[in-house]
Amino acid sequence: MDSILAKIIQRDPEQKEFHQAVQEVMETVRPVLERNPEFRKQAILERIVEPERVIMFRVPWMDDQGQVHVNRGFRVEMNSAIGPYKGGLRFHPSVTLSIIKFLASEQVFKNSLTTLQMGGGKGGADFDPKGRSDAEVMRFCQAFMAELQRHIGPDTDVPAGDIGVGAREIGYLFGMYKKLRNEFTGVLTGKSLAWGGSLIRPEATGYGVVYFAAEMLGTRGETLEGKTCLVSGSGNVAQFTAEKLLELGGKVLTLSDSSGYIFDEEGIDAEKLEHVKDIKNIRRGRIREYCEKYPQAIYVETDPGLDYNPIWTHSADCAMPSATQNEINEKDAQTMINNGVQLVCEGANMPSSPSAVDIFVENHILYGPSKAANAGGVAVSGLEMAQNSMRLKWPREEVDSRLKQIMHCIHTTCVDASAEYGLQGNYAAGANIAGFVNVVNAMLDQGLV
Ligand code: NDP
Ligand code: 2IT
């Protein structure tokens, strides 16, 4: 195993995030490989860490002033053992092949945990939508899809949203796909309701995170009622995490964006959350604007010189990191433990560094790893695909109850898989083992392809 990892690092030394994701899975599936010598003979690890296909492409587009820009587009089709490649698109200036490979790799195991028929993939571009007009975003999406369309399809690869890609972008991407391919199919998920989207898909990731948190608390005979919660981010995942927390009696103290965070000691209630949605989704503004309407809240500007993330210095019962990868480091994790945080449930993908995860696990807090805790989003994407195939639409209650059931099953799966290997209470190990075993069995069934 160590030599496989060494080879990955030697081959692509700059792909730090991908190495981190691979290493995290490898360390926890070690006992599975020891129990199954067949996996080694079939070079399962070597195969699973190599994407089935990597697509990188030029995205040329014109801004409102007539200036031409060139961005780099990606789609990593990681694994199709269980179903068509499935996973979001991220538009953010920090996007690199390493980031997309880490996300695609996580997506493979996450999708496997949902029990739906979805393989894993991820894509995106180093395009920064911030400050761009709707027309510029549209032209970028059209240029991006002009190339991507030849690689995807409803039975091949089904992208969706992620950071910087929401309902607006999915609309422009879908429009261009439909025009170029002359077909109206479920090639993307996260579509608007009127033209093939699923009820609850916008809410699904955040709601799912909270359902998973409630399941974890349930094992200790507790609920979210009265629990104080630190939520980071203020985009899709953070907003609906906060919404469901409020519904279940939690008190949300913080939200953030890449410029800084707000702390509202009185709690961010439903009315204040509506204001946040208006700031972020309609006006596309900054979280600091919250304090203009609610001056009792404090705003703390991001300081890139700090070796810790100040949002995690506030005392609370629970934390739901919902912004981006590696937003909790070792120091943050230790601060959280010292402050009495008893549950960390990850909305973002890989928000905790490896040493932060070690601290959570060693201290026996309830730690819900992203590939289990935030799987509700892609699960409802799977339900959107099912509805599109049937050309039917399920009511809100039906989708929500399926989501709740899926999150319950993922929780049980993690508990059972960790117990099977004598790692009771370690959800990270449970999620990796269960996700990995499903994919490996499917790969073995299908032969050397
Ligand atoms: P959005 O684009 O809707 O929101 C992202 C939020 O995180 C914004 O508040 C953004 O701030 C902040 N953010 C982004 N990058 C950084 C950064 N480098 N440093 C600090 N803050 C940052 O994205 P989502 O809510 O969809 O995604 C959030 C996380 O959840 C990601 O890790 C994503 O992979 C994960 N996820 C998303 C799913 C989905 O269905 N959308 C499903 C499962 C996981 P700003 O406004 O300044 O950009
Ligand atoms: O990280 C994720 O699971 C997502 N961004 C959602 C993927 C999807 O296909 O809905």
Image (cartoon, rainbow, N blue to C red):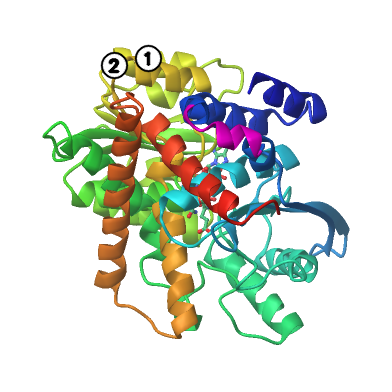
Q: Cβ–Cβ below 8 Å for labels 2 and 1?
A: yes
State yes or no: residue 41 in magenta.
yes
Residue 396 vs residue 378: left or right? left
**Magenta residues (range):** 35-42
**Mark 1 crowdedness (10 Å alpha carbons): few <14, some 14-19, many ≥20:** some
Kindly state the secondary structure of the residue where label 2 is placed. loop
Q: Residue 335 bears which disc, if any?
A: 1
Label 1: which secondary element: helix
Residue 240 as seen in the image, left or right of residue 213: right
Amino acid at circle 1: Thr
Towards the viewer: 4 or 56: 4
Magenta-span inclusion, residue 245: no
Q: Is residue 308 left or right of residue 273?
A: right
User: Where is residue 445, by image quadrant?
Assistant: bottom right
Picture coordinates of residue 135, whole percent (x, y):
70, 69
Label ID, residue 407:
none
**Amino acid type of the residue tagged 2 in the rendering:** Asn
The chief SS type of the magenta part is helix
Quarter that holds the N terminus: top right
Q: Which of 204 and 226 lies nearest the eye of the viewer?
A: 204
Q: Residue at 53%, 66% (x, y): give it.
A: 167
Cβ at disc 2 under 8 Å from ligand 1: no
Residue 301 visible at all: no
Residue 176 appears left or right of 158: right
For label 2, the residue is 339
Q: Please tell me whether residue 357 is drawn above or below residue 286 in the rendered image.
A: above
Residue 291, image x and y in percent?
39, 40
Q: How far separated are the C-alphas under marks 2 and 1?
A: 6 Å
In front: 111, or 300?
111
Q: Quadrant of residue 20?
A: top right
Q: Is mark 1 within 8 Å of ligand 1?
A: no
Quadrant position of the C terminus in the picture: bottom right
